[in-house]
Image: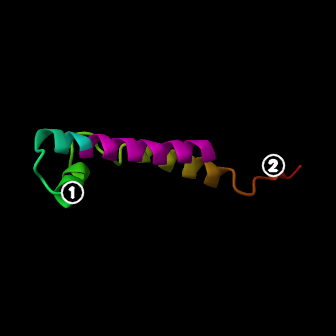
C-alpha cells in the first residue's frame, strides 16, 4: 500500500510536469505562474492518479488492527 501511495505521488508529479511543459510548448512567452495555472487545468488530469491513493488508503483502513495480523 505504501508503494501504491508513492506511485500515486509520482503519477501526480508526472501529470503536472507534462501539462506544464505542454503549456510552455504551446505558448512559449507565458510567465512561469501562468504555466503553473495552465498545468493545473491541462489535458492530463493531475488528480487521476489520486484514485490509486484512495484505494491504498481504503485497503490500509480495512486491515487496520485486523486480528489475523496480530499473530
Q: Position of residue 9 (x, y in %)?
A: 47, 48
- Dot label at residue 69: 2
User: As drawn, is 58 to the left or to the right of 46?
Assistant: right
> In percent of the image, x 24 and y 55: which residue is there?
36
- Dot label at residue 49: none
Q: Position of residue 52 (x, y in %)?
A: 48, 43
Precedes in sequence: disc 1 or disc 2: 1
Q: Position of residue 51 (x, y in %)?
A: 43, 45
Magenta range: 1-20
> In percent of the image, x 56 and y 50: which residue is there?
58
Residue 56 magenta-drawn? no
Q: Residue furthest front?
A: 29
22, 2: nearer the viewer = 22
- Dot label at residue 32: 1
Q: Position of residue 21 (x, y in %)?
A: 25, 42
Q: Residues within 10 Å of mark 2 (few under 14, many from 20)?
A: few
Q: Quadrant of residue 31?
A: bottom left
9, 69: nearer the viewer = 9
**What secondary structure predominates along the stretch shown in magenta?**
helix
Counting labels gives 2
Amino acid at each position: 500500500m505504501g508503494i501504491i501511495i508513492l506511485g500515486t505521488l509520482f503519477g501526480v508529479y508526472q501529470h503536472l510536469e507534462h501539462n506544464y511543459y505542454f503549456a510552455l510548448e504551446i505558448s512559449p512567452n507565458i510567465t512561469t505562474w501562468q504555466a503553473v495555472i495552465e498545468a493545473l487545468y491541462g489535458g492530463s488530469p493531475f488528480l487521476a492518479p489520486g484514485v490509486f491513493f484512495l484505494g491504498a488508503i481504503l485497503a490500509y483502513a480495512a486491515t487496520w488492527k485486523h486480528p489475523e495480523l496480530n499473530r
